[in-house]
Amino acid sequence: MTTLTALCALFAVAVLVLILGYIIWRGVGALNWRFLVDTPKPVGEGGGIGNAIVGSLLLIALASAMGIPFGIATGIYLAEYGGGRLGNLVRFVADTLTGVPSIVVGVFVYSVIVLPMQQFSAFAGGVALAVIMVPIVARTTEEMIRLVPGSLREAALALGAPQWRATLGIVVPAAASGIATGAMLAIARIAGETAPLLFTAFGSRFFSLYLDQPIASLTVQIYNYAISPYDEWHAQAWAATLVLMSLILAINVAVRFFTRQKY
């Protein structure tokens, strides 16, 4: 059984290595500095994904600023106070939202934000991605807090700390690494989403930092280039995919570094 489980683990790692290796092989040829800082150009004139990189970072930051605090607060409530009917209802809704297709979230945000504003916007894209993040962060936070030994809570309460202070000062820091992992998984999930952004942020061929205007993103640009009939844009799509994977890896490494346990 040990050998069998080891083979299964190696197979899972091999699939990941195969995918990453193929992306590197197809994308590294079109990767250069100008490609990283330039904006899209017509076929035959080069161009790059600088605006899409900036747009993706802005969308991820905006979604994280809205989704991660709300998700963590929801997870804390479910773990510490969610034993009643309201807690069960919130838990059920979070589980349901986790399985909702992202395109449905995009259509919903399109109906409640884009249509009233009468234009696509980075804000709408951030809201759509935040909606996807919240249930992932909430459920992960709940499970991580439940793993904290009850003796820590009892020790804090025995010293006279109120429950809210024990939760925020003792329990949450003890589960910080696991909570950060949940947030990291949520960021990795939204960083690769395309469908919600087609209905909200839409895309742009220019640099933009305005939240009330359409904005470019790596996933939408990869989608547009991948379905085009031009080999040059296909190569740029693979290069953009490599950049996106590198961005997700960099975020994961950074979160791991800052939440590592120090002894």
Image (cartoon, rainbow, N blue to C red):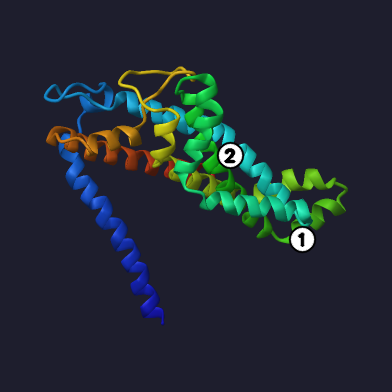
Q: Is residue 165 left or right of residue 257?
A: right
Q: In which quarter of the image is residue 85?
A: bottom right
Position above or below: 85 against 120: below
Callout 1 amino acid: Ser
Q: Confirm whether residue 157 shows in the render.
A: yes
| SS for callout 1 | helix
Residue at which label 1 appears? 151
The residue lying at 58 percent from left, 39 percent from top is: 68
Residue at which label 2 appears? 68
Residue 108: where, in percent of width, then height?
53, 36
Residue 231: where, in percent of width, then height?
13, 36
Q: In which quarter of the image is residue 206?
A: top left
Position above or below: 11 against 215: below
The residue lying at 34 percent from left, 34 percent from top is: 220
| SS for callout 2 | helix
The residue lying at 39 percent from left, 42 percent from top is: 192
Q: Is residue 17 left or right of residue 62?
A: left
Q: In this view, does 144 lie to the left or right of 18?
A: right
The residue closer to the viewer here, 40 or 116, is: 116
Position above or below: 157 against 32: below
Q: Which of marks 1 and 2 is nearer the N terminus?
A: 2
Q: Confirm whether residue 187 shows in the render.
A: no
Residue 119: where, in percent of width, then height?
46, 20
Evaluate if marks 1 and 2 touch, with contact meaning CB atoms under 8 Å apart: no
Mark pair 1, 2: CA separation: 27 Å
Mark 2 Cα shell of 10 Å, populated few (<14), some (14-19), many (≥20): many
Callout 2 amino acid: Ile
The residue closer to the viewer here, 100 or 22, is: 100
